Each structure stands twice: as C-alpha cells, then as structure tokens.
Image: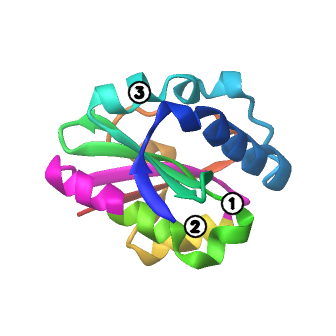
Amino acid sequence: MEIMTYQEKYKDQIINLILDIQNNEAKINLSLDEQPDLKDITSCYENGGGEFWIAVDDGTVIGTLALMNKGNGNAVLKKAFVRSDHRKKGVLSKLYDELLAFANSKDIHTFIFDTPSVATDCHHFFEKRGYRRIAKDELPFEYHYPDRDSYVYMMNR
C-alpha cells in the first residue's frame, strides 16, 4: 500500500469508492452533484492550500482523506473513507499521519469534520485522537455540509 497525494488518473476510482461507501454501506444517499468537491479535487483542495490523499494498493484506491484549508489556522477534514476489506489494516491512520504532517507545515491547529451519524467506526477513530462532538453553533467558522444526519467534530491542537 502506498499513500500519495491526489492524481487525476485515480479520479473515477475515488468517486466510485466514496459513493459506494456513502450510499451502499451507510445508506445516506448523497449524489455526486451534492459533492462538487469530488468533481474538481485540484481546485477545491490543492489550489486552496489544502490537500487530498489516497491510499493505493496494487493500483486500486482503497482509502481517501482530505484537508480543506479555511485560513487562519482552520481546516476541514473531509472524505475519510476506507474500503471495508482494508479497514482493520491501519489505512486511515496512515492517511491521517500524512494529513497531520501537512497541517503542521501549514500551521493549521483547528480541525473540524462532519461524519454521518451511522459511521461509528469513524467517530471512534477521531475521538481517540482528541476530537469532540460539537453542536453546529460551536463551529469556529462558517461551514456547510451536504449530509442531513451528520455529527460535527472539532479538535484544537
């Protein structure tokens, strides 16, 4: 397995992985149109001072994690997805380590993310790393997200 930053040649695999997990596993029924960031990853993440990482195993995308830089030391974590047959292999931990190293280099210290209420494994992963669930009115900056039944988490370092 290799962790790398976004490469256009993996775009379709990334979209398919994320939509499959969102809609077939989590049953949250999000369309690609509701996630315009997936249609233009370079503009939405990289050009804005953030990054999008993928885990690739034998040419196949098995995981994703992204950071959207909101400025002033703030960021949104997005697209934390790992294929079900790789979830117990430390893939998300490796992606998250890359994200933290990047965040340190950009002096990012406040992180938020939203995750579907049904994504309990994701909740546990981030809670173990110091994130706490917050109400929408506690958000330190304006942030909109498409899922109607999400929890919002935040961590300050």
Sequence-wise, the earlier of marks 3 and 2 is 3
- C-alpha gap between disc 3 and disc 1: 22 Å
- Amino acid type, label 3: Thr
**Residue under the point 27% across and 43% down:** 74
Q: Which residue in the structure is indicated by mark 1? A: 83
Label 2 is placed on what type of residue? Answer: His
Quarter of the image for residue 35 reads top right
Residue position for label 3: 42
Determine the CA span between mark 3 and mark 2.
Answer: 27 Å
Highlighted range, magenta:
98-119
Disc 1 to disc 2, how far (Cα)?
A: 16 Å
| Sequence order check, earlier mark of 1 and 2 | 1
Quick one: label 3 or label 1, which is nearer the N terminus? 3
Q: Secondary structure at mark 2?
A: helix
- 2 relative position to 51: left or right: right
Please say whether residue 103 is one of the residues in the magenta stretch. Answer: yes
Is residue 150 or residue 38 the one in the foreground? Answer: 38
In the image, taking residue 124 as reference, residue 45 lies left or right, namely left
Coordinates of residue 36 in the picture (x, y in percent): 57, 23
Q: Residues within 10 Å of mark 1 (few under 14, many from 20)?
A: some
Q: Note whether 112 is above or below 129 in the view shown.
A: above
